Amino acid sequence: MSLFRRMRDITVATLNEHLEKSEDPVRLIDQYLANQREQLVQSERLYQQCVSHAASLRQQYLTALETKEKREHQALLALKAGEEHMARIVLQEKLQAEEKSVQYHELYEQAKQSILELDEELQQLKADYKEVADKRSYYLARMESARLQQRMHARSSVTQDGAPRMFGRLEERVSDMELHARTLRDVRKMGRESFYSGGNPAVDAEMEALRNRLKQEGTQDHEQTIPLTKR
């Protein structure tokens, strides 16, 4: 695994870990996306540099290959002309060009492989960026839904709980008034019962006086009735 890919994996893992603990995931995602945009710019710049370098290596390889073929042809002409010494010199240059072409061809192949890997990682980085951007939209929508739900429940609690609380207080007040009225009625009833049942000392004294008076009147009537009977 390349260093670039390892850093990308660490970054994504860190984001997921922070998202689980964050109270403001949208803000955290915005920070991550800002860092990812910067990394994308740098990676695309590096990709272009690699492409340019590979093109340069390819040109060096083709130039060396062309020089090799040209020197081989020149050596053949010199040998035909009987200039063996010149043919040897040209063949020496031909071998040098051949070695150079092999070296640059290997570097070019390595550069092409690096470009393929970098392009794959760059595409993955873009896919990660898009995925996180989509998550941002998702979390933003969830937060908005949560805010609307909170507002709805707050209004619902006022509508549903306000009336019961109001009538509850009214019920308590009416109950207190009824209790007070029953208490006064019971007190008055007890007063009347006490009054008529002889519990009042003044009334008892009057009743005793009346009883004594009735006794006296009854005695007098009896005395007056006896003589009439003897006659």
Image (cartoon, helix red, strand yellow):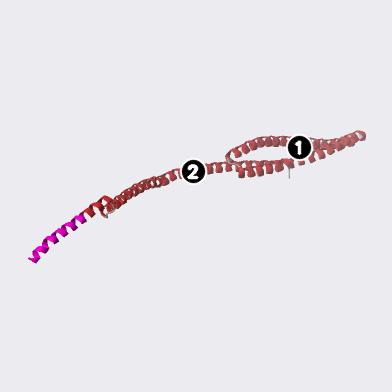
Q: Quadrant of residue 9?
A: top right
> Element at badge 1?
helix
Q: Quadrant of the N terminus?
A: top right
Nearest to N terminus: mark 1 or mark 2? 1
Residue depicted at x 21% and y 56%: 212
Mark number, residue 229: none
Q: Main secondary structure of the magenta part?
A: helix
Place of residue 158 in the rendered image (x, y in percent of width and height, measured from the top left): 43, 44
What kind of element bears circle 2?
Answer: helix
Residue pointed to by mark 1: 58
Q: Residue furthest left?
A: 231
Q: Is residue 218 magenta?
A: yes
Q: Position of residue 8 (x, y in %)?
A: 68, 42
The number of discs equals 2
Q: Is residue 120 visible?
A: no
Location of residue 178 in the rendering, given as x and y in whole percent from the top left corner: 33, 49
Tell me the residue at 12%/63% (across/down).
226
157 or 2, which lies in front?
Answer: 157
Q: Magenta region: which residues?
A: 210-231
